Image (tube, coloured by chain):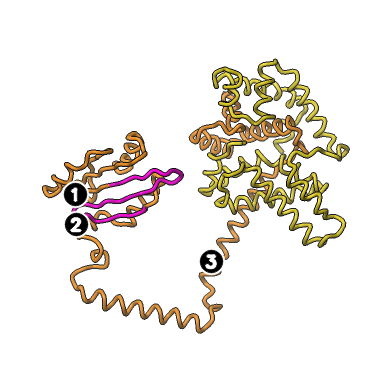
Chain colours: A orange, B yellow
Amino acid sequence: MESSVDHRLSLLLDGEASEFETRRLVEDISKNPHIKRRWLEMNKQKSALRRELLMPHLDLSSKIQNELQKSKKTNIQKQQGYLFSWGKIPYMRTCSYLFGFCLTLTFLFFELSSQPNQSFFQVSAPKTLVSTINPVMLDDFGRNFDGSLRSYKFISNNQVEANYGIKGSNANLKLKFFLKDGSNTVKLSSVSDGVTINTKRNNKPMIINLSSDKLSNQKLISISNLFLE
Amino acid sequence: MENDINIINLVKKGDVKAFDILVVKYQDRLVYSVYKFCNDFELSQDIAQEAFVKAFRNIDKFRGDSSFYTWIYRIAINTAKNYFSNKSRGAETYNEDILDNALSDMSLNSDNPETLLAAEEMKDAINQAFQDLPDEIRSTLSLREYDGLSYEEIAKIQNCPIGTVRSRIFKGRELISETFSKLGLSKTSSN
């Protein structure tokens, strides 16, 4: 067991551990003092071998961790201080903010009152899917698989298309959401690439199609599982 | 070149624990390099510490064009330059030539061995243990430690499977580790 840990640490030391293994080791080292000590020893040994060891017992890690925690707290306090520092804002600037705010409200009031039967969201999107799919949800969903929402569009009342860029690679992912009804039969026949799943959203049956230019079907399946969870 | 990309990606997501891995990995090398031109134990530690903190705060600026060590080394040198500039504005402690040489020469040799006795003893013992390793293991470990080759490159050179490289390096470290334990560092470093 110990030898196996040492073996894994040896790979980490040489930058040869996989992404998954690196994540596991980061957790193991932070939680287990014994493994942390072995990691320190192996690095000391490496430094001695390369004749770069100055102080055998040097370990800056706890000092640096404290420093980072301290500055994190200071930043939070600064942010809180900023939120409650209205008194420091010059009078003229405050007035101009208020004036701008009132102007925006007035504009919104006239704009929306000219379309009495539509809410703000419905101005930009058809009715049916808006209740189940919205941009905030799409954006949040992307975070589950390191995807950043690049664009989305409501193709029709029953169809939404969202495009994501996958962080750290140049792969794209396209998600198509369909509400299951007769009018979509034709559209669904055009969905041939990638992975398609049947699920429910707010008790409404829904079909989701995932396709990508670079991601493997296995990866698409693992992302599609997020919808089923 | 050291491959720290997996760890750095975690740090970029704000993982402080992952950053700790990098600190332990590079602290000795960085302190050693900084010590070369400031000749002060305490100061070299402080500068290295500050460089690590700066590196964490600016990790998004690290593009991976060079190794992480090269990047943090440059941060440390600039930190040292600022320190000396602010302190003395060209007085006797600060020597621009030394700093510039340090920037271009990253494998400097110690010229103050009397203050580094413990470390020197350890280095000698470890290097002796390295020399005593079986030939195959020593040559594999040498290609890794001194030439900085990846496992794949070593496997090609030695015409053997990558798994063999992996186990030879591990075995070599394990054997050296026995010498290391005898020197007593394993017990005291836990403090």
Image quadrant for the N terminus of chain A?
A: top right
- Within 10 angstroms of label 2, few (less than 14), some, or many (20 or more) residues? some
User: How far across and down, in percent of the image, does residue A45 sit?
Assistant: 71, 30
Image height check: is A179 above or below A55? below
User: How far across and down, in percent of the image, does residue B97 sit?
Assistant: 81, 51
Residue B32 occupies which quadrant of the picture? top right
Image height check: is B58 above or below B165? below
Taking the image as shown, residue A122 lies to the left or right of residue A182, namely right
Q: Secondary structure at mark 2?
A: helix
Amino acid type, callout 2:
Thr
Residue at 70 percent of width and 15 percent of height:
B134
Looking at marks 1 and 3 on the same chain, the residue that comes earlier in the sequence is marked by 3
- Residue of label 3: A80
User: How far across and down, in percent of the image, does residue A127 sit?
Assistant: 20, 60
- Residue of label 1: A179
Looking at marks 1 and 2 on the same chain, the residue that comes earlier in the sequence is marked by 2
**Chain on which label 1 sits:** A
Q: Are marks 1 and 2 in contact (CB under 8 Å)?
A: yes
- Residue of label 2: A128
